[in-house]
Amino acid sequence: MRGDKCVRISVTLPQSLLAELDKLVSQGFKSRSQAVAEAIRRLIEELRMDWRGMVVCIASYCYEGHHSSEELRELGHRYLDVVVSTLHIHVSEDLCFEAVALKGEAEKIKSFIRELGKVKGVKHLAVTAVQLPGL
């Protein structure tokens, strides 16, 4: 996208989100515009993913509560054919972070991620995926 003509737009944000953006800008971006453009690029890349065929990805999330832990364990067992590995980190007494490595058919992985998002207590679900052409 280098060399593209820049166009000015107007965006309305909550004050707290703008404060977070400004914090990010001060930590390594030249301007708000550069930070917002990078965020939009990443969002487009993430949403443009063509979920077909073989995919590898990482699903990461935080969750609270022992009830969630049991439900997440059961979910992982139902999807043994695509769950490769799970990293579990105790953030605090009540909060855990997990990263699940997945590999397999895109439809099956999408199904796992949809169910993961429905587990009570799961927050900040993020997915990074790569298609494996030719497999």
Image (spheres, rainbow, N blue to C red):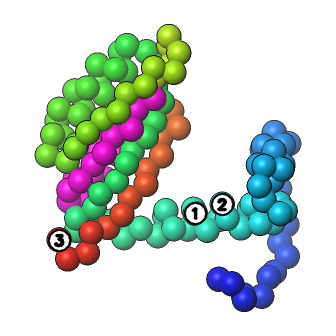
Give the Cα separation between the discs numbered 3 and 2: 30 Å
Kind of element beneath mark 3: loop
Whole-percent x, y for residue 70 in the image? 29, 19
Q: Mark 1 points at which residue?
A: 42
- Residue 52 locus on image (x, y percent): 27, 68
- Residue 25 visible (yes or no): yes
Query: Is residue 135 rendered to the left or right of residue 73?
Result: left
Name, please, the residue furthest toward the top. 93
**Residue at the disc numbered 2:** 39
**Quarter occupied by residue 17:** top right
Residue 117 screen position, x and y as percent? 41, 39
**Crowd rating for badge 1 (residues with CA inside 10 Å; few <14, some 14–19, many 20+):** few
Residue type beneath disc 3 = Leu
**Residue positioned 46% across, 70% down in the render:** 48
Which amino acid does the dot numbered 1 rest on? Arg
Q: How far apart are marks 2 and 1 (CA)?
A: 5 Å
Q: Which dot marks residue 61?
A: none
Quadrant occupied by the N terminus: bottom right
Residues at marks 2 and 1 touching, judged by CB atoms closer than 8 Å:
yes
Is 112 contained in the magenta span? yes
Marks 3 and 1 in Cβ contact (< 8 Å)? no
- Residue 135's tag is 3
Would residue 84 be found to the left or right of residue 24 on screen? left
Mark 3 crowdedness (10 Å alpha carbons): few <14, some 14-19, many ≥20 = few
Magenta region, residue range:
97-121
User: Does 119 sit above or below residue 66?
Assistant: below
Q: Which residue is drawn at 26% across and 75% down?
A: 133
Q: Which callout, 3 or 2, points at the residue further toward the start of the chain?
A: 2
